[in-house]
């Protein structure tokens, strides 16, 4: 198993002890896509955020490649687990030109950087030189989400949490983003956790689905 | 009646960008129209230009006729009467558009005070009635609550209540279902279907929602209107290759889409049909801009239908 959680629980302060995520036991293997399907507020994003190391669990464990990981993820684990958010416009620093945000992984992880190679890589996501010198507010939601995806795939993650990545996008851009992800999965055997409130989409994109209600994660029959 | 005649919007800066290019539309009283298209296709800009809410570097050309009166020529005072009084605008992402420091009941009733000279107490009382009309549940308590205690879907519906509170006859709603889950989309759909006499114009990327609320659908692609007809024509018998691709890419239809790249950017100077680079039916002729053809009242900008 690439990643699993054991009785992972999150209780937000000020929420009268009501858990947002209640003893969740989920697992995902390499080359597998699992879905968290539920209404907004059901706790599906909170579990995604905990696995990504962005929110600390109240109790329970997260295992990545068989080893327990604690809140302060080592740099290599951070690189291996990436997250794509629902709102592309808030995934980027609004003050920076896109190029600054897109070259960040090269600096952080010391990847070999060559401007022309980067341009070539980005063209696969429909991001061209003219986009690079604009700020996020001057780009469309679809362009930003494709740029966010390009930034994530650059570090070759092993697990990607997809938190409603297409709910703000039109159907064609949605298919394009999902196709890029599927292609990446075939090449790299990466695992995906797909968080969504769209049942049709969840069924067609995921191998297995957990239904999420009031913080409780239950495996669900895909045909249900 | 609201009529758009050849409306274009250009943003003038170092390099000017044409965000809307020659859109024409007729919104008859009580009609419901949806504008669909991908992000960046110009749909929201078109809506903002009707409200005259664009930044000062936006040059709008063409005519926007409200019962024959050109809104583009209206002065400040007249615009104030029109905004909220005749045409109201429900912006994208309801939450950020409400004042976090004011109670929802006051905000929903505010247009009544502004446009109809109603007292604050009376307006707040009426706002409870409006929230009840849209069936938000426990309306007395909600009216006394602050926006942050509302869910996204509730805020969106409260925004529609605010939009019609002063009796505006034309409602413009920008992406009212964006990011909401299925249950909440159904509630927002119900909210719009409760409006019977008002003229409705919604911008959405959600085809299923468009089909449920609108009689007419306008499809936009790369700042142009590529297809315009009744919802049954557009969904049941789409003509433009882009509309067809969009419909087959819907999750309900199996998300079939043969990827042929991305929309041209605003700066790219595409001479011919803007969809030609991605179109599987592209012909030699498509290197020239296609005219708008009329197929039984169903308008389409594609060489395939040009006579």
Image (cartoon, rainbow, N blue to C red):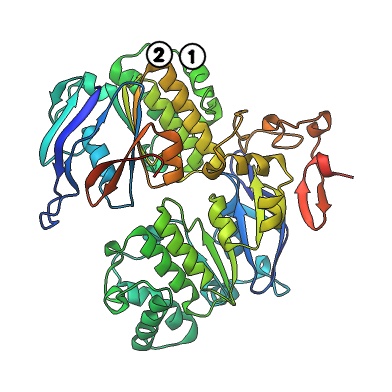
Where on the picture, by quarter, is residue B250? top right
For the point 27% across and 37% down, which residue is it?
A48
In the picture, the quarter occupied by the N terminus of chain B is: bottom right
**Furthest-right residue in view?**
B307
Q: Which residue in the structure is indicated by mark 1?
A: A117
Image: A184 above or below B104: above
Q: Do callouts 2 and 1 point to residues on the same chain?
A: yes
- At 57% from the left and 63% from the top, the residue drawn is B213
Circle 2 chain: A
- Spatial CA span between label 2 and label 1: 8 Å
Q: Position of residue A75 (x, y in %)?
A: 21, 21
Q: Is residue A76 left or right of residue B155?
A: left
Query: SS class of the residue under badge 1?
Result: helix
Task: Name the residue nearer the viewer: B186 or B91.
Answer: B186
Chain of the residue on which disc 1 is drawn: A
- Foreground residue, A36 or B66? A36
Q: Are marks 2 and 1 in contact (CB under 8 Å)?
A: yes
Q: Tell me if mark 2 has few (under 14), some (14-19) or many (20+) residues whose alpha carbon lies within 10 angstroms of its own.
A: few
Residue at image x 13%, y 38%? A7
Q: Which residue is mark 2?
A: A113
């Amino acid at each position: 198993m690439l990643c699993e959680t054991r009785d992972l629980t999150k209780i937000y302060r000020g929420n009268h002890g009501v858990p947002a995520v209640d003893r969740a036991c989920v697992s995902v293997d390499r080359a597998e896509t699992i879905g968290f399907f539920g209404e907004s507020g059901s706790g599906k994003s909170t579990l995604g955020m905990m696995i990504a190391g962005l929110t600390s669990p109240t109790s329970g464990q997260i295992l990545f490649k068989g080893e327990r990981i604690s809140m302060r993820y080592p740099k290599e684990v951070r690189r291996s687990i990436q997250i794509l958010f629902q709102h592309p416009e808030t995934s980027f620093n609004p003050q920076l030109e896109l190029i600054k945000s897109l070259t960040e992984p090269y600096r952080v992880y010391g990847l070999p950087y060559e401007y022309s190679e980067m341009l070539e890589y980005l063209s696969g996501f429909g991001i061209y030189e003219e986009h690079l010198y604009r700020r996020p507010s001057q780009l469309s939601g679809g362009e930003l989400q494709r740029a966010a995806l390009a930034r994530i795939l650059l570090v070759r993650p092993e697990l990607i949490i997809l938190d409603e990545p297409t709910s703000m996008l039109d159907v064609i851009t949605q298919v394009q983003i999902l196709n890029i992800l599927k292609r990446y999965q075939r090449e790299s055997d990466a695992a995906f956790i797909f968080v969504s409130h769209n049942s049709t989409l969840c069924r067609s994109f995921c191998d297995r689905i957990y239904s999420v209600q009031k913080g409780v994660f239950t495996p669900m029959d895909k045909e249900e | 009646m609201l009529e758009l005649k050849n409306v274009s919007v250009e943003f003038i800066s170092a390099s000017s960008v044409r965000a809307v290019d020659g859109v024409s539309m007729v919104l008859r009283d009580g009609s419901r129209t949806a504008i669909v298209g991908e992000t960046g296709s110009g749909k929201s800009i078109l809506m903002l230009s009707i409200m005259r809410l664009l930044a000062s570097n936006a040059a709008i050309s063409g005519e926007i006729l409200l019962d024959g009166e050109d809104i583009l020529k209206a002065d400040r005072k007249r615009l104030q009467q029109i905004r909220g009084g005749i045409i109201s605008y429900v912006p994208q992402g309801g939450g950020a558009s409400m004042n976090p420091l004011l109670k929802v009941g006051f905000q929903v009733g505010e247009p009544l005070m502004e446009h109809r000279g109603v007292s604050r107490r009376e307006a707040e009382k009426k706002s409870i009635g409006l929230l009840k009309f849209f069936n938000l549940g426990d309306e007395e308590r909600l009216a006394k609550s602050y926006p942050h205690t509302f869910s996204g879907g509730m805020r969106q519906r409260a925004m529609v209540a605010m939009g019609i509170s002063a009796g505006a006859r034309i409602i413009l709603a920008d992406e009212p279902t964006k990011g909401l889950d299925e249950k909440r989309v159904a509630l927002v759909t119900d909210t719009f279907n409760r409006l019977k006499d008002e003229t409705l114009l919604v911008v959405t990327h959600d085809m299923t929602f468009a089909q449920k609320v609108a009689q007419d659908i306008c499809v936009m692609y790369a700042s142009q209107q590529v297809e315009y007809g009744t919802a049954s024509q557009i969904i049941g018998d789409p003509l433009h290759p882009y509309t067809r691709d969009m419909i087959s890419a819907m999750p309900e239809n199996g998300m079939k889409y043969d990827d042929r790249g991305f929309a041209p950017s605003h700066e790219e100077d595409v001479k011919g049909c803007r969809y030609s680079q991605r179109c599987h039916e592209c012909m030699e002729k498509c290197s020239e801009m296609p005219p708008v053809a009329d197929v039984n009242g169903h308008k389409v900008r594609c060489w395939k239908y040009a006579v």
